Image (cartoon, rainbow, N blue to C red):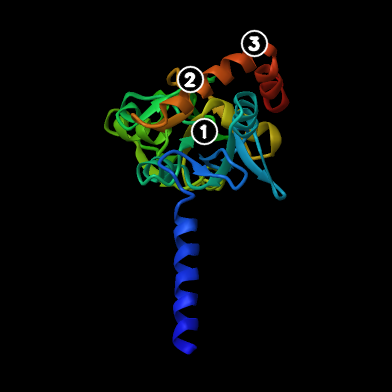
Amino acid sequence: MKKLGLLSLFLILSIFIAACGSTDTKSGKEEKGGGKVYKVGVDTTYPPFEFKEGNDYKGIDIDLINAIAKNQGFKIELSPMDFGGIIPAMQANQLDVAIAGMSITDERKKVVDFSTPYFDAGLTVVVKNDNSTIKSVDDLKGKTVAVKKGTTGAKYAQDNAAKLGINVVQFNDSPAMFQEVSNGNADALIEDYPVISYAIAQKDLGLKIVGDRLNGDQYGIAVLKGQNQDLLKKIDKGLAELKKDGTYDKIIKTYLGE
C-alpha cells in the first residue's frame, strides 16, 4: 500500500507539472479560459509614460497598450522592470512585447522590430533653476552629465562625450538622475523632452530645460526581431484605429494636456 501510494502521488505530481509546463508558448502564454496572454515589459519609473500610483499602473504607455489590446481582442500582463533589462528579457523569451518610451534607433532595430511610431519625443538638456552658465549643449564642456542607463540619452552622452568634453554618470532610474542634478552632484542631465517636461510640471524639482532639442526621437512598441509578427500587425492596426477614433488623442491629453 505504501509503495502504491507513493507511486500514485508521483504520477499525480508528474501530470500536474506537465500541465503547468504546457501553458507557456513561444508567443504569449495560454490563459485558463483560452486565448493568449502576452507579457509586456514596462518601466514604471518613467512618467508620464509609465508610473505606479498606489497599486495601479498609469501613464500614456499603460493606457495605450491596454487600449490596443482591447481594440484588437488580445490580453496582456504587465511586467515592470528597469529599462535597461527590457530588451535582454525579450531576448531571453521572458517578454513578448515592450512599451517603455523606447526610442526607435538603428541599433535597437538589430534586435527588435518596432511598430509604427506612436510619439515624437527628442532629447533635451536640463540644469538646476539657478544655473545661469549652461544655456545649451555647447556649454557642457568640462561638466558632469547624468543619464539613465540603456536610454538614447545615455547613448547620446557617451557617443558625444569626447566631442562635448563631458563626464558621464549613469543611473538606473529617472528620479535618481533628477536628484543628482538637484543636489548639485551633477551639472546637467539629458532626458526625453516630454518626460522631463511632465516631471517639472508635476513637482518642484528645482530643474529647468535649456536649449533646443538634441534630436527628433520617436517612440515605438517593440517585439523581438522576427518574432510575434502577427502581434505586431495587431498593434499597428490597433494604434491606427485609436488615432482614427480619437482615443489616442484623449490618452495624450490626459497626461500632457496637448
Q: Position of residue 253 (x, y in %)?
A: 71, 21
The mark lying in front, picked from 1 and 3, is 3
Nearest to N terminus: mark 3 or mark 2? 2
Q: Nearer the viewer, mark 2 or mark 1?
A: 1
Vertical arrangement, residue 35 with respect to residue 139, above or below: below
Q: Is residue 121 visible?
A: no
Whether the residues at callouts 3 and 2 have beta carbons within 8 Å, the answer is no
Circle 2: residue type: Arg
Q: Is residue 245 above or below residue 140?
A: above
Q: CA distance from mark 1 to mark 3?
A: 21 Å
Q: Quadrant of the C terminus?
A: top right
Looking at the rendering, which quadrant does residue 255 occupy? top right
Residue pointed to by mark 3: 244
In the picture provided, is 207 more to the left or to the right than 148? right
- Circle 2 Cα neighbour tier, 10 Å, few/some/many (<14 / 14–19 / ≥20): some
For marks 2 and 1 on the same chain, the one whose residue lies earlier in the sequence: 1
Question: In the rendered image, which residue does mark 1 sit on?
Answer: 99
Discs 3/2, front: 3
The furthest residue to the bottom: 2
**Residue under circle 2?**
213
